[in-house]
Image (spheres, rainbow, N blue to C red):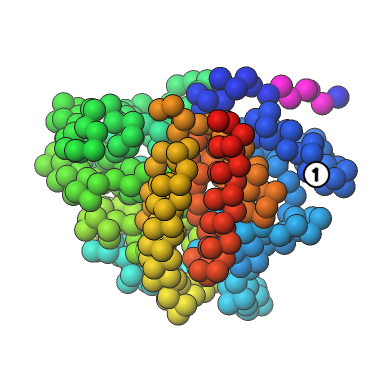
Amino acid sequence: MDSPVVPPARADLDQLRSEGDVNLSPRRRAWAAEHLTPKTQALLDADARHFLHQSLSTPCLNALAKAEGAWIEDVEGRRLLDFHGNNVHQVGFAHPRVIAAIKQQLDELSFCTRRYTCAPAVELARRLGEIAPGDLNRVLFAPGGTSAIGMALKLARVATGRFKFVSMWDSFHGASLDAISVGGEAVFRKGIGPLLPGCEHVPPPEPLRCPFKCGTACNLACADYIDYVLEKEGDVAAVIGETVRCTPFIPPLDYWKRVRAACDKHGALLILDEIPIGLGRTGRMFACEHYDVVPDLLVLGKGLGGGVFPIAALLARESLNVATHTALGHYTHEKNPVACAAGLATLDVIRDEKLVENAAQLGDYTLAKLRAMKARHPLIGDVRGRGLLLGIELIRDGKPATDEAEQVMYGALNRGLNFKVTMGNILTLTPALTLTQAEMDQALAILDDCIGAVAAENP
């Protein structure tokens, strides 16, 4: 007999400031009861019977039948513009060039055993090193971003002879034990028990929640604090951070330069996590290019497999090729030829279809539209973004408008727009980089209507 699932109280949900919307929300259950037919509910019930339940996923919201381009379609034929996509759809879903490359590779070589190499893996590593900033020309592949983060942490320890890390509260680097140790979200850490030793956390560069009370006149005290921690600890292997938090929070332009200087001063490495935001999403191929900073280690994932195959990459400086005596990853699918073929096709599509340029131009256009929307809606406390990584933060009476954010999200679902709520009150918009201006206008009209309707219902 299945154990009953008891949704947490609203107050508990508000405390879980996470990068995803909590799946046990009472409002989600109410939406499902109103909009899902018995056919869909039967599939969701079966899913809930067979999968372990966990926050942010199972039990699920709905069931999909198709994903193509910038759109998803549920099993009942309802189409939605997908501004969520788990950040895997830089080239859109089911891009024909990615699918064709996968099919061709399946016919030629479907797997490469661990002691051998293959042409697609070598070529993908070469291409990544070629387009990466600075001298990030050494590569390791892994089945997913979390695993690649683990490899980065291990390499930093090997290269420096130190074991400590400095990372940010509210950050997310994956769900494994080592990744949540450097990560900072309570929904992943709470109640798990002892984590990786030597993980220190500092405040992130979030202007609206700045503990240093900088206000609008930011003096980068958060970056200076990292310098202070590195000095006092004295034996930190690396600082690890998300170049741009995908909620999103956009660090000031000098932030990473100051952190880079602090790392150099104290002998620590700099690891930048661009798993969800690399490969063009921010309007540059790599988000660190906005900050004119080259990390020692850069981690990519999610969209690298074209929204089809799971593959991630660790990019490292040539000088960090120092771990020949140990195994950093040694994953069974490290050089999977089919995954690497998907990655090569993805890079080709990004280049040939000028998706980085599209993200930059359409992002600027959208940010201007969102600022105009903010002027019309007092419920909008802030809009921000870089490229096609965009966020609308809802504030009421100076506090996060968490319930209103959920109302907007489910109202938008009813009108054909899918996105997620992060940190409880931020409408996070991450569409495919293949999105057209007409599709963006369609999505913005839905958001405008939904925010206005929710504000009217909650005067």
- Residue 238, compared with residue 77, is above or below; it is above
The answer to which image quadrant residue 51 occupies is top right
- Residue 198, compared with residue 99, is above or below; it is above
Left or right of 338, for residue 397: left
How packed mark 1 is, by other alpha carbons closer than 10 Å (few <14, some 14-19, many 20 or more), is: some
Question: Residue at position x 58%, y 31% from top?
Answer: 458
Which is the main secondary structure of the residues drawn in magenta?
A: loop
5 part of magenta stretch: yes
Position of the C terminus, as image quadrant, is top right
Q: Nearer the viewer, residue 25 or 192?
A: 25
Left or right of 125, for residue 37: right
Percent from the top left, x then y, of residue 88?
54, 57
Q: Nearer the viewer, residue 177 or 167?
A: 167
412 part of magenta stretch: no
Question: Residue at position x 47%, y 43% from top?
Answer: 377
Percent from the top left, x then y, of residue 373?
46, 50
> Is label 1 in a helix, a strand or a loop?
loop
The answer to which image quadrant residue 113 occupies is bottom right
Residue 18 in view in this figure? no
Percent from the top left, x then y, of residue 394?
47, 37
Position of the N terminus, as image quadrant, is top right
Magenta residues?
Answer: 2-6
The kind of residue on which mark 1 rests is Leu
What residue is disc 1 on? 36
